[in-house]
Each structure stands twice: as structure tokens, then as C-alpha cells.
Amino acid sequence: YLKCHISFLSTTLIFLVSRSCPVRGDITDGNTEHLKREHSLMKPYQGVGSSPSSQWDFWGSTLVTSSYVRLTPDEKSKQGSIWNTVPCHLKDWEMHVHFKVHGSGKKNLHGDGIAVWYTKDRLHPGSVFGSQDQFLGLALFVDTFRNDLHGMDRSFPYISAMVNNGSVNYDHGKDGRASELGGCSAEIRNREHDTYLAIRYSRGRLTVMIDVEDKNEWKECIDIGGVRLPTGYFFGASAATGDLSDNHDIISMKLYQLMVEHTPEEENLDWTKIEPSVSLLKSPKDNIDDPTGNFRGTPLTGWKVFLLLLCALLGIVVCAVVGAVVFQKRQERNKRFY
């Protein structure tokens, strides 16, 4: 009876795991068949400039060479950006960014970082790594300088993501903690080898992967569901320096179309009217007082329900095993008295 009971519970547990943890597709290996050249920036950077036929336009201190696009030189108080002039109408996509951050500054004496954008507006300079605050869309920040001296629980450089509907300010003083969706630390400065990041958006899930250790493999940095992004926005990259500086270089930005099937309801939806949002999180404004930067008071999402069920199931298994052992011991003890 005990073996059958445990076997049944084990089978139930396996079923719950398989139902609650769908397998996420791997980051694409860069299949050229799905490369969208109109949204990609590659050597020798043809189609970059201010002419009407250009697919990429740049601003500020940006310098385009035959080997890289330098958003800022290693000089103080510089801002630069480069933006795709063609709006993206793909529902599911993946952007690979080959970048390099390097300079003469020693440890903790460099800044400020790079941002990769998918936003409604483009070529709007501002205070957020060289681009505008209160933007509409998605931003990925590669922040190389710590502003919040109280936030010593994470190391810099630090990579984070933010979705904004135009109403939230990026808080430089707190390194964007109040509005970030997630992030990870990554040693990306002055590396002798290439450094990459990949941003995938598919079926409402945002995944960010990094390859910065010269191992030719992706490492997960951010993975969050419930993200809603419209079509028709623009890709871009920007960087800024302040009292401290770095060279911020973009070597390439390659966009790949992901072949994903959508329901008829999703296909008939006007994706250009979607408001950028993250349904699994409360408004970032509700979390400003959280010193850890984590979102509190979030609803019970799928994975939280699964964890609760898993804990309850494990408790049942433990109680069943303990009860069976106790029962068997009592039976053996009773036999001694008869």
C-alpha cells in the first residue's frame, strides 16, 4: 500500500511539473534565413546616415567607422545614439547585439553605460543613457556605474530591463531599481574577447541572454512573462558619459524574425494599439519604497501557484511516509505482546 501510494504521488508530481513548466525555445543560433536586414546594423554599415534612403540615422557624438559604431568616445559629458528608421512590424523577434565597452578608467572610475531600445519615438536625446525619459516601449540598460551606494547587494556593470508606458521616470539615483523587470551582473568592460547580448520577445515573454565569458554559449539574465509590446516601434542604441567616461561601441545589431503561430484572436488584434505593459507586476510606482528593488505584492502568477502546489504535495508525501512508518512500527510492537 505504501509503495503504491508513493508511486501515485510521484506520478502526480511529474504530471504537475510537465504541465506547469513549458519548455522555452532556445535562443536562435543566428539563422540568416530569418535575418531582417532592414532592422539590422552590420559592417560595413551601408545605409547609415541622414539621407532619405538610410535605414539607420545617428545623433550626438556617434562616430561611424568601418569596424564599429562608437556612440561615445572615452571623454566626459558625451551622448550619442543610432536608430533604425524602419518601424518593426514583427510580433515575435530576437535582437542580437555585439558591443564593446572599454576605456582608460580604472575600477569604479568609468561610466555611464549603453541602452538598447525598442520604442515609439527615436532620435530624442535625453537623460537616460543619452535618450529620453518617460519613453514608450522597452529599454535594456547596460549600466557600468553604481549611483546608489546603499545598493551593495549587486555588482556593476549591471544589465536590467524596463517597460514603460510613458508615465514612469528612470531613477538614476537608485540605478533604476524601482522600475526594473529583472537583471544580472556581467563583467563586460575592457574584455579582450567579444561580448554579446540577445533580447527575445515572443508570445508575451521577454528573455535576455548574455555571452560575455568567451565560452560561445548564452547565459540567462532575465526571463519574464506577461510583457505586452506593440508593433510599429523603432530599434536603437544610445550611450552617455558624465564626469567619468568610456568608449561605448556597437559592432552589430542583428534582428531575427521568430516563426511563431498565433491564435486567430491574436492575429486579428491591432498590435499597433497595444500599450506597453507588464501584467504580472504591479505598477513600478508602487514599489519605489522597496530597498531591494523587487516588486512586492504581486498577484499569484502561474509559477507561484505551482510552487504552492508543489510544497503541499511534498508535505502530503512526507506525512504519508511518516504515517506509514509509524503504523508499521506499531504493528511490529503489537506483535511482540501477543
Image: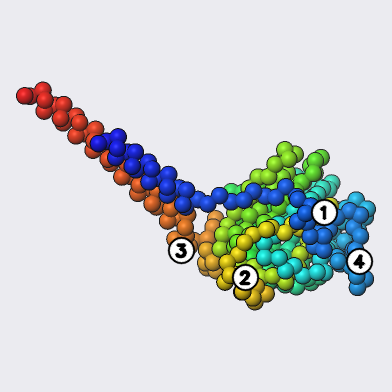
Q: Earlier in the sequence, mark 1 or mark 2?
A: 1
Q: Count residues near mark 3 (Cα–Cα under 10 Å), then give few for <14, some for 14-19, many for 20+.
A: few
152 horizontally vs 309: left or right: right
Residue beneath label 3, please? 299
Q: Which amino acid does label 4 sit on?
A: Gly
Percent of width and height locating residue 213:
72, 40
Q: Distance between the residues labelled 2 and 3?
A: 28 Å
Q: Residue 252 carries which label?
A: 1
Residue, disc 4 = 49
Compared across the picture, whether 57 is left or right of 225 comes to right
The location of residue 242, given as percent across then percent down, is 79, 59
Name the element at disc 4. loop
The CA distance from mark 4 to mark 1 is 16 Å
Task: State the image quarter where residue 234 is shown.
Answer: bottom right
Q: Residue at x 52, y 63 (%)?
A: 280
Secondary structure of the residue carrying tag 1 is strand
Q: Distance between the residues labelled 1 and 3?
A: 39 Å
x and y percentages locating residue 30 in the rendered image? 75, 50
SS for dot 3 = loop
The way the protein has been coloured in the rendering is rainbow
Note whether residue 95 is visible.
yes
Along the horizontal axis of the image, is 7 left or right of 126? Answer: left
Label whose residue precedes the other's in the sequence (4 or 1): 4
Q: Earlier in the sequence, mark 1 or mark 3?
A: 1
